[in-house]
Amino acid sequence: MTCLSYNLTFYVAHVKTVSFCWNLSRNGESLCHFPKEVMMEEIMSRVPADSLVQFKCVNKLWYALISALINGPAFVAKQLHNSKNKSSPLYSPSPSVDHRLITLPLLTLFNYVDDNNRYISVKEDLNVPHLQNENFGANWSKEFSQNQRMLERMRIPVREFGYDSRAKDYKLVAIWRLPIGVAKVEVYTLRSGSWREINISLDSSENIKGYAHLDGLSWRGVCYWILQSFSDDNVILCFNICDEDFHIIPLPNLEDISRFICVFQRE
Amino acid sequence: MSSSSTTTTTTRLLMLKASDGVTFEVEEAVATKLGAINNMVEEEGSEDLICLPNVNGKFLGMVLEWCKKHANNNTNSDKGNDEVNKWWDKEFVMDLDQNTLYHLLMAADYLSGTELVDLLTEKVASMIRGKKVEEIRETFKIKSDFLPGQEEEIRKKNSWAFE
């Protein structure tokens, strides 16, 4: 595993420093000549996100090229623009394309429980910080450091990830519910590479606190969570990635019905 | 059309010389579809003979064929023109082999034919879009140079894309 990371890091560095090789296959004459780097960027920006990510498996050079491209905000913005623009005479969308990827371009961020029963974040395409990072929410951790159990719970904030099409940047939003009955929200932007706290209204704070479990999704620049309450009506909490503000959508009371949030895709 | 002198003063003819010495005589309005040529022509006292040492005659000919079609079609202010151009573009790129496509793209880029570059990059993209990794390797004769296990690891980490 370490070997792989080392090699691939090397290749990414290689692509960035040395002018891109003009022939991606590099063996023989009758082969495809793939154009220079600038044009590769142009070509790859016309390929859907899932294909791009698959193509990282072609060989090391493709891996390095695509990895470098999809970490660049300018490329992502262009890819997003192209995937929405269907006026091109040659465009024929493949039926297998998952349109979710248009709004979640090039995103790999998921969590799973490892052997030690810890939550870990898997990152591949984008340099998103591990959520287990010690510095994450460190200021508040200090405040409640006497309460170990609370601290452990706080290490797993509610978070969602999305693309800000206005700023052309990815954002990770983390909601922390603090034991004193308030919620705090931090936003991480890929470009700045740092976290900052954002102000939230008292209303939103009221709505967030006290819920045991939040399940969310991110869709077209908005993150949604169902807030499940034991007593009151349920609501959907929305977070606008561009404006960085919260809204509430009321839900009817659906007792005893398990609920989840999803996107219904119409062709 | 009534006076031949008018025609000769408005239609300037340019000579484009390719790397292999092949020359093309084209109307200014056609050649200036290419940004690079346009810049040269706009310079004061520019000559009518333009040497293009980076483009082979075969591909320069094809680029100019494209320019000619688009320059002609654009003179008619017809609504259906856009459609005609699109249809013609589709025909133009339909049967290009990889080698021709590559050299044509290089030529179009060198000559700053933005629209043509767009058309050709879209063609290349259409050749790889929606293909499987194995098909890409097959199409472009690429060999995987990953160490054992590396490809599986990448697939595992990006499993969402392979679903």
Image: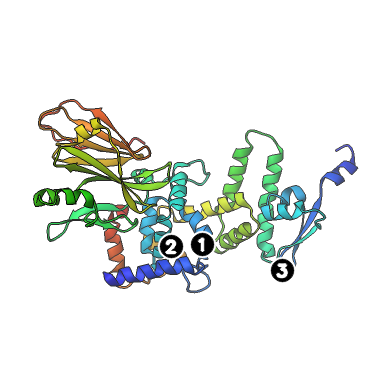
For disc 3, the chain is B
- Coordinates of residue B162 in the picture (x, y in percent): 31, 55
Dot 2 amino acid type: Leu
Q: Is residue A29 above or below residue B122?
A: below
Q: Quick one: SS at disc 2?
A: helix
Q: Is residue A51 visible?
A: yes
Q: Is residue B55 above or below residue B75?
A: below
- Coordinates of residue A246 in the picture (x, y in percent): 29, 34
In space, the residues marked 3 and 1 are separated at their CA atoms by: 26 Å
Q: In percent of the image, x 29 and y 55: which residue is there? A: A129
Dot 1 amino acid type: Glu
Mark 2–mark 1 contact, CB under 8 Å?
Answer: yes
Q: Nearer the viewer, residue A184 or B123?
A: A184
Q: Which mark is residue A65?
A: 2
Residue with the mark numbered 3: B20
- Coordinates of residue A242 in the picture (x, y in percent): 38, 39
Q: Quick one: SS at disc 1?
A: helix
Foreground mark, 3 or 1, reads 1
Q: Which mark is residue A37?
A: 1
Q: In percent of the image, x 37 and y 45: which residue is there? A: A163
Q: Quick one: SS at disc 3?
A: loop
Check disc 1: other Cα within 10 Å, few if <14, some if 14-19, many if 20+. some
Left or right of A230 in this view: B10: right
